[in-house]
Image (cartoon, helix red, strand yellow):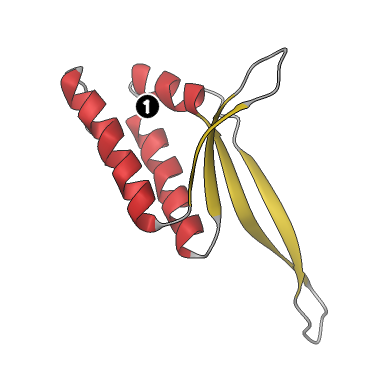
Amino acid sequence: MLPINIIASIHPLLHLTNTRKLKLKIVELKICITDISDSLTLDQNALVSSIITQARDLVAAGGVVTIERRYDNASSDHLVSYSTVEDIDAWKNKLNEVQKTLGCKKID
């Protein structure tokens, strides 16, 4: 299985109950575009579909998804940020257009 380097930034929200549990809320998901393209190249569409589903759920809950390109010896390049479900769906559609052009399987 291809290792995916997804960084999730978390923001702690204190949830006061009888047990005083600490509730963590993910507010940003950073995805390396190379991981997405490598997964698609290796026909790991289910993995990409799962990432897109998580991204969709996160923005629906008010979070932000950032797509970036990471380098070993330099800082990452920010490519785009998505903050709505429609943005995530449009990104998925663009990925599927590329998949169709290349004659590859569609991302569910």
What is the tally of numbered marks visible in this picture? 1
Task: Return the x and y of residue 59 as percentages of the image width and height.
Answer: 48, 57
Q: Residue furthest top?
A: 73
Specify whether residue 107 is in view: no
Q: Is residue 9 left or right of residue 107?
A: right
Which residue occupies the foreground of this view, 80 or 61? 80
Q: Residues within 10 Å of mark 1 (few under 14, many from 20)?
A: some
Q: State which quadrant residue 32 falls in.
A: top right
Q: Secondary structure at mark 1?
A: loop
Q: Report the residue marked by disc 1.
A: 44
Q: Residue at x 41, y 44 (%)?
A: 52
Amino acid tagged 1: Gln
Q: Residue at x 42, y 53 (%)?
A: 56
Q: State which quadrant residue 86 falls in.
A: bottom left
Q: Residue at x 37, y 50 (%)?
A: 87
Task: Return the x and y of residue 2 as percentages of the image width and height.
Answer: 51, 22
In which quadrant is the C terminus drawn? top left
Task: Return the x and y of residue 80 as percentages of the image width and height.
Answer: 49, 38
Task: Return the x and y of residue 71 as percentages of the image width and height.
Answer: 64, 17
Q: Is residue 107 left or right of residue 63?
A: left
Q: State which quadrant residue 23 falls in.
A: bottom right
Residue 54 vertical placement versus 100 (above, below): below
Specify whether residue 100 is in view: yes
Q: Is residue 56 left or right of residue 15?
A: left
